[in-house]
Amino acid sequence: MQDREDYSNCPLCEGVEFTEIYRADCSQHQCYSPQFRPEIIWKKCKACMHVFTSGYFTDAAFEVLFSKTPESRSVGYKIEEKRALSAKMIEKILPYANSGPWLDIGFGNASLLFTAREFGFEPIGVDLRRDNVMALQQIGVEAYCEDIQQLNLGRKCSVVSVMDVLEHVPHPKPFLRAAAGFLETGSPMLISMPNSESFAWDYATGTKQNPYWSELEHFHNFSRSTLYRLLEEVGMKPVRFGLSERYRLCMEVVAVKG
């Protein structure tokens, strides 16, 4: 099985000149299958400095990948412990929205949605792992197993969250534009991912402790600069930067639709 389609252009700026910067073994990843290549090759665009893998998964490879759901991404995982962490994220949104539909794209264990409902929001989830979607539907939460670029909710949302998802998406710009399309003007988006533009990232890389180079499911390593530029290109204005407590080396950004 061919597991990856090679990028012929930079997935952010369409540049055609890139250099190889890192190779990493991904064969020990929890979702690894012998059908996947055991090595990830990372490249950097000479035009916009974005860092991305040499290629992204084919449809067949995605099917293999999504056939497994890691325990930490299963609905209800450590529900009480994650509730307190999710509350901290929601508090960053409250100055911009405090009610209405909250759409979480790639909801994983669904802690953010469960906690958003406690704060008075209406939870809506989208995820490509069908087991997770069915688990939410069975408890009465609106949920979809669908590409957001084809999803039609029939209404706008007060909040959209994209938490540790964009780095998993082969082509981030149309994905993020579609996510922003669910928002009214002035409504917020909460987004998080690893931040390669930090001393902590450089230290972890230099000491061979950085887990993201060998992360099988990631196709991008964003910096704060590249994320901000991308948000602005799809009509979102960053208004708040912070650190994420969900995963190592991550940033959390609130952006408002212009």
Image (tube, grey):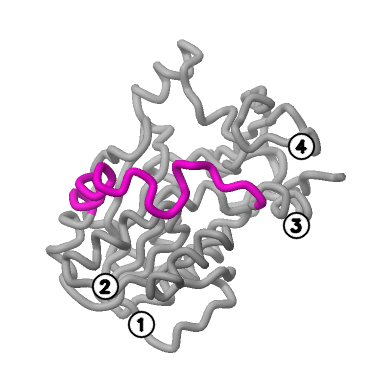
Whichever of callouts 2 and 4 sits on the residue coming sooner in the sequence is 4
Whichever of callouts 3 and 1 sits on the residue coming sooner in the sequence is 3
Residue type (three-letter) at the residue carrying disc 3? Asp
Q: Which mark is residue 156?
A: 1
Image depth: mark 2 or mark 1 in front? 1
Is 83 on the left or on the right of 26, as rendered?
left
Q: Do callouts 2 and 1 mark residues in contact (Cβ within 8 Å)? A: yes
Q: Which mark is residue 59?
A: 3
Distance between the Cα atoms at labels 3 and 2?
Answer: 33 Å
Q: Do callouts 3 and 2 mark residues in contact (Cβ within 8 Å)? A: no
Q: Do callouts 4 and 1 mark residues in contact (Cβ within 8 Å)? A: no
Is 59 on the left or on the right of 166, as rendered?
right
Kindly give the residue lying farthest to the top in the view shown.
207
Looking at the rendered structure, the secondary structure element under dot 1 is loop
Q: Which residue is disc 2 drawn over?
A: 187
Image depth: mark 2 or mark 4 in front? 4
Kindly give the residue lying farthest to the left in the view shown.
95
Distance between the Cα atoms at labels 2 and 4?
Answer: 40 Å
Q: Is residue 74 magenta?
A: yes
Most foreground residue, 188 or 105 = 105
